[in-house]
Image: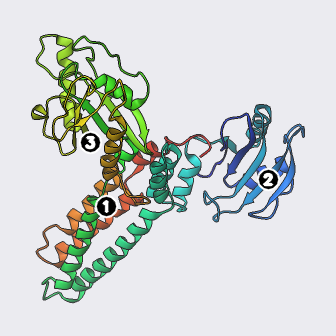
Amino acid sequence: MAADTIFALSSGRPPAAISVIRVSGPAAHTAGQLIGGPLPETRTAAVRELRHPDTYELLDEALVLRFDGPASSTGEDIVEFQCHGGRAVVDGVLSALAAVKGLREAQPGEFTRRAFENGRIDLTEAEGLADLIEAETESQRRTALALAEGGLRKQIEAWQDKLLALSAQAERAIDYDEEDQALDPALVSGCVELAAELRSWLDRPRIEPLKDGVRVVVAGPPNAGKSSLLNAIAGQERAIVTDIPGTTRDHIEVPLSLRGIPILLTDTAGLRETTDVVEAIGVSRTEVLVEGADILLWLGEPADAPKHPRLVAVHSKVDICGAVPEGSLGVSSLTGEGIVALIEDIGRQAKGLLPGEDAIALNRRQASHIYEASEALDGPAGDVVILAENLRLARAAFDRLTGRAGVEVVLDALFGRFCLGK
């Protein structure tokens, strides 16, 4: 399939002011000439009449750009048509490209996959690009951009250089010190230092709370005001509110952006003993959600609060329930009292769970391979032969991290997230 020439609409669906149609592959320049006439010099643009290759019907007057591989985004020859963004114009140009022998429509993510397969980007950059396309908040955009621009790739290259130097040192010891296989202290300390550096990266905040939202769970006994509080924070009626205990029997999730931080706010069933089968299921689910919460808003008695590292004791209905217990934050969903202070507190704690501004954050896949490498470097090494094997295992983990080996299933899942023209 890599020998095919592919094409697709790479901008948003029409109508639009301008639409960008990309062609990539060995026949890209030929196709560009058949439809747009003589191509401009590489990396320059020119206005051309676009015509159907069979009927010579005028389709549009457009800007045509040419890129020569391997110095292109995909590593292949590329032609781009920047045409008017009407549906009929776009459909006409795509139909003309489909009529050119040897061309086919691209699959989702195929342009980016070719960039990866041709060495223009590595797997971590491709993951960052996918996250960038899906980013909905400013913090998501910054973190994804750090990956897409090669921040992690550069760090991995530095680690790989250290690994290669250590491996070369171990191999020399095996080849030339046949009688004495004792470990060189400098070699051992180099492995220990690199393993410690990898572990420090594993201790950083991960990307999942940034992508999926920091899980903020509202919990407490029935009729504590949980649903009203969720509605007040969300700024809209998302949960049913009544005076009847046990109204909420299942959890309700509301994705929000608070101060640019992605939040997954969750209302839960009231915690109590119950003989109602349906409500009991809701209570059981609440217990699971409380345990997995990143931040827990507790609306019950402070003494009854579950143990949690980031618990916010909320005294709800402060307008009618009197004095606020020490250590609790008084709020009223009816009057709005304390809601702003509560949102600020949630934002402050959520920010501590997220990567720092412009920081490189690892996803689960990346962290798992870095963990494999650190474990190999920390593995038992009775002699230099075993140490050399541990170094080889660490290098293999980095190859999987960058996509050089053993990641075909990962590739299919990743590039399937991309749109058709990416």
What SS does tag 2 mark?
A: strand
What SS does tag 3 mark?
A: loop
Q: What amino acid is at disc 3?
A: Asp
Residue 53: x and y, percent? Answer: 84, 42
Q: Is residue 353 visible?
A: yes
C-beta proximity under 8 Å, tags 2 and 1: no
Residue 397, numbered label: 1
Q: What amino acid is at disc 2?
A: Val
Position of 390 compared to 306: left or right? right
Label 1 crowd (10 A; few <14 / some 14-19 / many >=20):
many
Residue 64, numbered label: 2
Identify which residue, 237 or 391, lies in the foreground. 237
**The image quarter in which residue 236 lies:** top left
Determine which residue is flagged by label 3: 294
Residue 74, numbered label: none
Position of 116 compared to 285: left or right? right
Tell me which label, 3 or 1, sits earlier in the chain: 3
Tell me which label, 2 or 1, sits earlier in the chain: 2
Q: Is residue 254 visible?
A: no
Residue 141 vs 216, above or below: the answer is below
Residue 134 vs 129, above or below: the answer is above
Q: Residue at x 17, y 87 (%)?
A: 178
Residue 160 vs 178, above or below: the answer is above
Residue 197: x and y, percent? Answer: 27, 69
Q: Residue at x 17, y 41 (%)?
A: 327
Mark pair 2, 1: CA separation: 43 Å
Nearer the viewer's eye, disc 2 or disc 1?
2
Tell me which label, 3 or 2, sits earlier in the chain: 2
Q: What amino acid is at disc 1?
A: Ala
Identify which residue, 389 or 317, lies in the foreground. 317
Residue 190: x and y, percent? Answer: 24, 78
